[in-house]
Amino acid sequence: MSPHAEEEDATNAYQSLSETTGHDDPRWAFGSGFEDVQAEIEAPVPDGVDAADLAEYCLMLGDDALVCSHRISEWVSNAPELEEEVALANTALDLLGQARVLLSRAGHVEGAGRDEDALAYLRSDAEFRNVGLAETGDDLDFGVAVARLLVFSTWRLALLSRLVGSRDPVVAAVAAKGVKELTYHRDWAARWTLRLGDGTDESHRRMQAGLEEVWPHVEELFRTSEVEHRLVTAGVATDPAETRGEVDAVLDQVFAAATLTRPDRPGRGTLGGRGGRQGSHTEALGLVLDRMQSLARAHPGASW
Amino acid sequence: MADTGTPATGTPDTAPHTGPGTGALEAGFDATVAADRRIEPRDWMPEGYRRTLIRQIAQHAHSEIIGMQPEGNWILRAPSLRRKAILLAKVQDEAGHGMYLYAAAETLGVDREDLTERLIDSRQKYSSIFNYPALSYADIGVIGWLVDGAAICNQVPLCRCSYGPYARAMIRICKEESFHQRQGYELLLAMVKGTDAQRTMVQESVDRWWWPSLMMFGPPDGDSPNTRQSMAWGIKRHTNDELRQRFVDMSVPQAAALGVTLPDADLRWNAERGAHDYGEPDWAEFKAVVSGSGPANAQRVAHRRRAHENGAWVREAAQAWADKQAARAARKDAA
Ligand SMILES: [Fe+2]
Ligand SMILES: [Fe+2]
């Protein structure tokens, strides 16, 4: 293409602006495959599956992604290098894409007229179903951020790779797309764990400290809720307890190569047996939601 | 977003190259530029040309990176998940633009780390527009519409810049910028169809960003000492005032379609000129912002410095790890 043609193209794009409101370009929707998934959102609840359970399960997987995406987005314009700026934003965007589909599915299955935004912006913290790890802050300490993403992506990849055969078509579709995304996230986090663990004395110390900080949230990842128990039987969910062996093996391999030590810290306790899956969260989630929801809640009836 | 591509400040790099034996080289350079062909990194080029390009490309790269801040400020609060995804993707694009542009600058013999130091020491500038704060979500739409829009007017001609690596980076960047602009405008269209509070928010935002957007084209032609030399070198294709006029003429019907008023009492169609007459931007404010005392200069540079310094231990670790890997590979080879 000649430079002149290039100039005309861009100028035309500019001049036709007022006619362009379209969602025709795939980049409006973010991420190839999203449209296909969207078509599935209204698929019927599979036979023998309790709709309320399915909605709850979609919230669990969706809230994990949404809240973790928020934490990663805090790094925008704060990353140690431009390449990491791009990688972190990309990871946040992938997780946000997963969250949007899962929340849309939860709203559809629930049948109360709530869409992805009603679920993201108008629920209180006790109504969120994410695990504590997703909401853990890092105060822009790269060691903590890498540790959190390493554990989160290793666990979520193990979950999603088991969910590609879910009887719920939306869960299965998110899993199929998510496996590719999470493979990249885990690879990125593992590479940084290696560099930091086996880099300088300071980076070794800070990477180990990052792991120690997120470790109390690990045990919860393998705790199976009542809803999950029932949906495993129904062929929709996977039992998180069964991912423990895979997650441990991957993490041990990374720790060994990175000269790091597996932390030996007790898991965060439950509140009367309730954890994140039952809406019992750390104080951090309220602050995340205050920020995430403030503008949407300030303008009821607005269209954005 | 992006930079103005107009070196609005600094001294003109017009010192003639007078080294012995460069006559033929210089003639070759001039012929290449005159024929509208590209100068490539290995080609001989006048020192002033090299310095001007380094300064302009670096300033442009810095603008992409600093430009992430005002919009990044709203990612966590985006009012719908779709808008959050659009904004996150846009800000990610800007980081990518910064990377391409630093890479283009590196072909001229400087390195990114050094350019970053010059930015956080305030020895190099970035587009003055980012020294204004993003105060409402309407600003996200208006920045896309007007700021990315002004950037497109400035940058489309740079796709034909005489320096090959810069021209090629701009082609890639311009495509994404025009997408950003459409997204911004589409947000504003959605907002003006919403509540009264949203319409008020859009107008208030346009009122704040209109004049700074006009200033993105740099000082008036009479006060732009670099323009003539940059045009002779094929770095610049149009004067600041030509580009500003084009931007005003394009923006007026778009503002009308949105139902917003541009805050300029002198703005009117001039049938004789076939263009809009418009008022004079406040050049005193422009000079103040460029020289460091705009509403957000200190905040922007401090933010960039903090991110860079907080990341030092990470970059050192990556280097140490790479060195260890290389040493291990060398030992393996030796064994
Ligand atoms: Fe842009
Ligand atoms: Fe840009």
Image: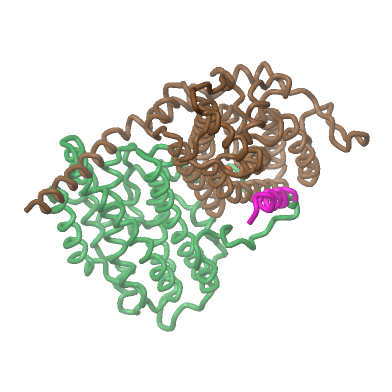
Front residue of this view, candidates B24 and B183: B24
Q: Is residue A33 above or below residue B61?
A: below
Q: Residue at x 49, y 60 (%)?
A: A100
Residue B191 screen position, x and y as percent: 68, 47
Does the magenta segment cover residue B107? no
Residues drawn in magenta? A1-15
Chain that appears green: A
Magenta: main secondary structure equals: helix
Q: Is residue B55 above or below residue A292?
A: above
> Which quadrant of the frame does ligand 2 lie within?
top right
Does the magenta segment cover residue A5? yes
Name of the residue lying farthest toward the right = B272
Residue B139 falls in image quadrant: top right
- Left or right: residue A286 versus residue B288 is left
Residue A291 screen position, x and y as percent: 47, 41
Tint applied to chain B in the drawing: brown
Residue A148 screen position, x and y as percent: 28, 49
Q: Residue at x 26, y 54 (%)?
A: A151
Front residue of this view, candidates B85 and B79: B85
Q: Quadrant of the N terminus of chain B?
A: top right
Residue B135 screen position, x and y as percent: 58, 33
- Left or right: residue B288 versus residue A249 is right
- Left or right: residue A8 versus residue B18 is right
Question: Does the rendering let one see residue A25?
Answer: yes
Q: Residue at x 74, y 38 (%)?
A: B247
